[in-house]
Amino acid sequence: MIKKTHVKSFYNGIFVTCYEVKGVKYVANQHGDWDVYEGEYVRGERTRIMPKDSEEIKNIIKEHTMHHGGKR
């Protein structure tokens, strides 16, 4: 199951979208891409950056949208 929440950005302090899948957090960053955290959302603990046009993040958003009645 995919969980969508909002977390406070380390960069500018505003709340940004976060998708969580099996303990992995995908957090929107200021460039439009996604920072990936395996475990807790802790500054400096990012494991990788996922481009906004990657199939992986597109599939996560698509699956979440399908399971929540079209709400992104």
Image (cartoon, rainbow, N blue to C red):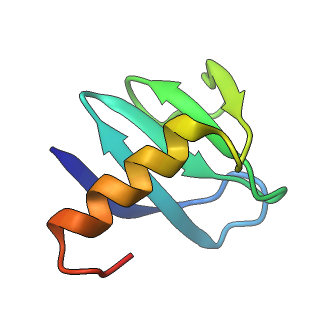
Residue drawn at point x = 18 percent, y = 80 percent:
69
In this picture, is 42 found above or below 34? above
Residue drawn at point x = 47 percent, y = 37 percent:
41
Q: Position of residue 14 (x, y in %)?
A: 64, 73
In this picture, is 15 found above or below 52? below
| Quadrant that contains the C terminus | bottom left
Q: Is residue 44 visible?
A: no
Asked which quadrant contains residue 36, the reply is top right
Q: Is residue 65 visible?
A: yes
Disc count in the image? 0
Residue closer to the observer: 62 or 24: 62
Tell me if 66 is positioned left or right of 32 in this view: left
In this picture, is 40 found above or below 53? above
Tell me if 66 is positioned left or right of 27 in this view: left
Residue closer to the observer: 67 or 17: 67
Residue closer to the observer: 68 or 46: 68
In this picture, is 66 found above or below 55? below
Q: Position of residue 65 (x, y in %)?
A: 30, 68
Asked which quadrant contains residue 28, the reply is bottom right
| Quadrant that contains the N terminus | top left
Which residue extends farthest right? Answer: 31
Residue drawn at point x = 43 percent, y = 37 percent:
25
Q: Position of residue 42 (x, y in %)?
A: 53, 33
Asked which quadrant contains residue 64, the reply is bottom left
Residue drawn at point x = 40 percent, y = 30 percent:
40
